[in-house]
């Protein structure tokens, strides 16, 4: 089996990591992108032109278009006949322009959609939808459980201005003036940096505040957003206790299993979770750190996600002969 992932700009390096997942279970996979990413050391190969895409597409059994962007491949007549074709939706482009995007992919006979977050679920014209959450590299991201200071370090490193930073800081300011918690934690915040630099600073924290973004900021939708992202996975893989919004947790437990997210879907829940974690004994806190790491190993490691992708291919493209390019 050969799999080609095609990105315009591989947001959060997801296409590249999916290719690595497939490689971890013995599949020949490559991700290519029209634009390179400044923040990542390892990333999708930048393709030179449509002729290169056409050559790769001819050789592939499975083609996945990343982040709702279609690229002409030159093998459109083979879609879903001798090739399995899917699209991955996971960002603002799809949230804003889903009607035209779904219409475009339907016209190209691409009817299988991998949907990253449930606020993007059920949008008109998506075809067959599969809830598909991303992986993280549990071999590269090793856990660090040792406390670096007597006080717990609470970190928040937002990638954009829609992560609920003001709310987190209001609550932390309140806790910094509370006699029971004020001397027990340090708050660290930083601007967007390279992926490698971000991992280095994540290693030094104990608690990671990822996101509080419960409602869509887009006028076109009134859906609840409120889902965790890649930084939550990476922090958990490093053994950090993650506090973030997670409105789909009940469905997650049904489809994926148990998780280690410290759910904070409201102002009061954020304060309650942080107060509990700040006052928690070292022994209890260490157990939570280890459960964070184990959750990622069990549900979001490269091998686990690679097998999940293979199951999808084998379920929806049974008619395709892998040896018949």
Image (cartoon, grey):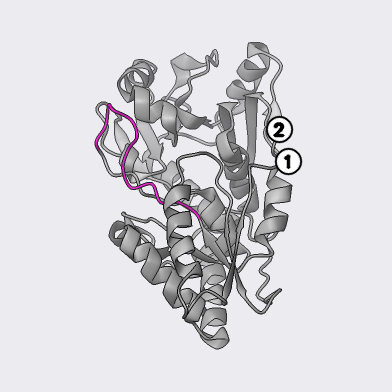
In the rendered view, tell whether residue 129 sits above or below residue 176: above
Q: Residue at x 49, y 39 (%)?
A: 161
Q: Secondary structure at mark 2?
A: loop
**Stretch of the chain drawn in magenta:** 210-222
Residue 304: tell me if it is visible: yes
Q: Residue 158 has which mark?
A: none
- In this rendering, which labeled residue sits more in front, label 1 or label 2? 2
Q: Quadrant of residue 92?
A: top left
Seen from the viewer's position, the closer of residues 142 and 183 is 183
In the rendered view, tell whether residue 224 sits above or below residue 77: below
Disc 1/disc 2 C-alpha distance (Å) = 10 Å
* Quadrant where the image shows the C terminus: top right
Q: Quadrant of residue 57?
A: top right
Name the residue that disc number 1 marks. 42
Name the residue that disc number 2 marks. 38
Q: Main secondary structure of the magenta part?
A: loop
Please say if the residues under marks 1 and 2 sit with CB atoms less than 8 Å apart: no
Q: Residue at x 67, y 76 (%)?
A: 147
Q: Residues within 10 Å of mark 2 (few under 14, many from 20)?
A: few
Q: Position of residue 128 (x, y in %)?
A: 30, 36
Residue 258: tell me if it is visible: no
Q: Secondary structure at mark 1?
A: loop
Left or right, 41 with reference to 145:
right
In the rendered view, tell whether residue 101 sits above or below residue 182: above
Left or right, 215 with reference to 310:
left
Q: Position of residue 115 (x, y in %)?
A: 39, 40
Q: Position of residue 157 (x, y in %)?
A: 58, 50
Seen from the viewer's position, the closer of residues 315 and 73 is 73
* Quadrant where the image shows the N terminus: top right
Left or right, 51 with reference to 243:
right
């Amino acid at each position: 089996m050969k799999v080609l992932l095609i990105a315009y700009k591989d947001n959060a390096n997801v296409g590249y990591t999916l290719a690595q997942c497939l490689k971890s279970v013995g599949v020949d996979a490559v991700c290519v992108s029209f634009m390179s990413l400044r923040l990542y050391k390892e990333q999708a190969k930048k393709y030179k032109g449509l002729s290169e895409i056409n050559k790769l597409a001819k050789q592939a059994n499975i083609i996945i278009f990343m982040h709702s962007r279609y690229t002409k491949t030159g093998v459109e007549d083979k879609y879903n006949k001798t090739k399995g074709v899917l699209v991955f939706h996971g960002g603002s482009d799809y949230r804003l322009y889903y009607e035209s995007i779904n219409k475009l992919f339907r016209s190209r006979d691409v009817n299988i959609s991998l949907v990253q977050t449930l606020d993007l679920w059920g949008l008109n014209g998506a075809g067959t939808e599969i809830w598909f959450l991303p992986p993280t590299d549990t071999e590269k991201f090793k856990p660090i459980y040792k406390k670096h200071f007597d006080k717990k370090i609470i970190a928040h490193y937002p990638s954009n201005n829609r992560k609920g930073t003001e709310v987190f800081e209001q609550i932390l300011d309140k806790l910094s003036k509370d006699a029971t918690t004020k001397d027990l934690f340090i708050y660290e915040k930083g601007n967007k940096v390279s992926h490698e630099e971000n991992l280095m600073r994540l290693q030094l924290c104990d608690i990671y505040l990822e996101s509080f973004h419960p409602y869509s900021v887009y006028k076109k939708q009134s859906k609840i957003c409120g889902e965790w992202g890649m930084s939550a996975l990476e922090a958990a893989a490093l053994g950090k206790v993650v506090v973030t919004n997670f409105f789909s947790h009940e469905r997650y437990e049904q489809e994926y299993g148990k998780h280690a997210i410290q759910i904070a879907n409201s102002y009061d829940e954020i304060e309650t979770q942080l107060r509990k974690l700040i006052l928690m004994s070292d022994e209890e806190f260490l157990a939570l750190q280890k459960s964070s790491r184990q959750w990622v190993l069990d549900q979001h490691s490269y091998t686990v996600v690679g097998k999940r992708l293979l199951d999808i291919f084998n379920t929806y493209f049974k008619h395709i002969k892998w040896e018949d390019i």
